[in-house]
Structure formats: structure tokens, C-alpha cells
Amino acid sequence: MACTEEEFTELLSGEVFIDMDKLIAISRHGIPDKVRSEVWKYLLGISKTDKSEEERVKKQQQQEYKEIDKNDSEITKKIRAHLKRYQNFNRDKSDTRIKIDWQSVEIRNKIENIIISYINYNNDIEYSFGMLAILGPFISTLQIESDIFFCYLAMMKKIEENLQIESLTLKLSRFIMYFRSVLPELFSHFEEEEINSNDWVTSWIQNFLSCELPIECTLRLWDTYLSGRLGLDLHVYVCLAILTNFSEELLELEHSEILSFLQHLPGIDIDQIIAQAYNIFDDIRANNEL
């Protein structure tokens, strides 16, 4: 059961330190919108649990971010082109509480600054659309640019570490195998309609549904990814749970309709999806398919 905003506020207002065990425990059931930015900073290790260190660390992070080069005209062009694509993903979603104008100068400048800073911070990487997709939820949640950058940096590190354990190629293969096993009728329907997995699976898995779901659904999902017992490993099973939830509708659709549906998912009860994802995980483990 999700805790109230007041319960989170009480926990966050500790004068000496933050009880991370308790914060993690209550976050996995969902974080209220008004405290999500502060909670995510703790869950990602950006804010320190020792309150005496809080101001010093915050100033240090702001100064460090200020010193990172934020200029690259070629990357800026790519980001602006991709922003239109990202906005198209997020247009006409059923979300009613969180509205972001992705083409506004303020938002665009933040995105460009943060992504270019991230690339300059990590000299051995190249820009990709996935960087923008993962940044979106942080832009929607946090206000201070340096906070967004360091949360984004921590999330990208989590994703990188997760991919070191199992590569994206292996994750995609495992998802397809589970899809065939858990939803054989829907899998066969996709084959009959000649649905290419590259047209939807890669984005679902690689970008953690940050493009396909309404933003408030993505934020709720990520609350659990940052605090749940399986972490990012739950994601494959969340994708299976979403397909299970929409299987009847998808079975009635044809090729182009299926792809459109998969790329622009409607609003959904994420608490129910997460519970179903854990059940699918337990079932697969019980059948020794993990």
C-alpha cells in the first residue's frame, strides 16, 4: 500500500539523518508527486543521508556541473531533431496531471546542457536518442539543472552496470523467449501480422518505456525500479505484464494498428502491472526458465 505525502515528508524532515532502509521500503509502492524529486535524489545517492553534509555536497555538485563544457553544435542539432520525435511519442497521452512543453526554450536548453555535459563528462560515448528518452522523466520531476544532471548520471550508471551483467542483445532475446512462452497466442498473432520486434522491443527494453507510456505511468514505474528488490531487472517482466494486460485488444488489431498501440501505450494501473510482473517473474523462476 502506498504511503501518503505526509509520511514521506516526516521521514525526509529528519534533522540528523535519513533512514534509507525505511525510505526504500516505502518508495517501492509509489512516491507522491510533490516529494518524488527529493526522494529520487536519495534513492540515486545524489543527496547524502547525513544532513550535516547536505549543503556542502550540494554546493560541490553545483560547482562541478558549472565547470563542465556545455557546447557542441553538432550534438545540439541532433538533440533538437530528436526532441520533435520525443514530443510526438508524448503527444495525446492520457496523462492529465503532468504536462511538459518539450519544445519550450527553457526545457530545450536544460536538455541540451545536460546531455552535452553528460557526453563531455564521459569522453568515450556518442550521442543517441536513448539518452534523451532516459532524461525525460528527470526533466519532468526535478527543477534544478545540476540536480537533474547528477540524477541522470546516476541512472545511466545503473543502466550501464545492469547491461554489464546481461547485454542488451541477451535481454532482447530473453524477452522474446518469455513472450513466446507466456503469451503464445499473442506471439503467434504478431508473427502472422509480420510485426518486426526491432520496431518496438528494442525501445521498450532499452529506454525502460520512457517513450511509450504516459509520463506519470513512467514515473510511478521508475519509483519501483529505484527501490524494489529486483531493481532494473524487473523491467522485462513489466513489459510482459503490459502485453498480458492488453492482449485482448492487441489480438483484435492489424499490423500498423499494433505498432501504433505498442509505441503509444494508453494510461494503465502501474501498481497492478508491477504486481503482475512479480507474479510472472515468480512463475518463470518456478518453471526454471530464468
Image: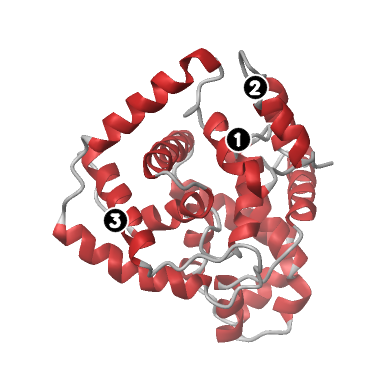
Q: Along the line of sight, which residue is nearer the eye, 45 or 18?
A: 18
Task: Using the image, determine if residue 14 lies above or below residue 62.
Answer: above
- Extreme residue toward the right, this view: 1
How packed mark 3 is, by other alpha carbons closer than 10 Å (few <14, some 14-19, many 20 or more), is many
Residue at the spot x=48%, y=49% of the render?
138
Mark 1 and mark 3: Cα distance apart in space: 25 Å
Quadrant in which the C terminus appears: top right
Task: Name the residue tied to disc 3.
Answer: 112
Q: Amino acid at mark 3?
A: Glu
Q: Amino acid at mark 2?
A: Met
Q: Are marks 2 and 3 in contact (CB under 8 Å)?
A: no
Task: Name the residue tied to disc 2.
Answer: 20
**Of callouts 2 and 1, the N-terminal one:** 2
Where's residue 83, x and y in %?
A: 36, 67
Task: Using the image, determine if residue 200 lies above or below residue 164.
Answer: below
Task: Using the image, determine if residue 86 lies above or below residue 35.
Answer: below
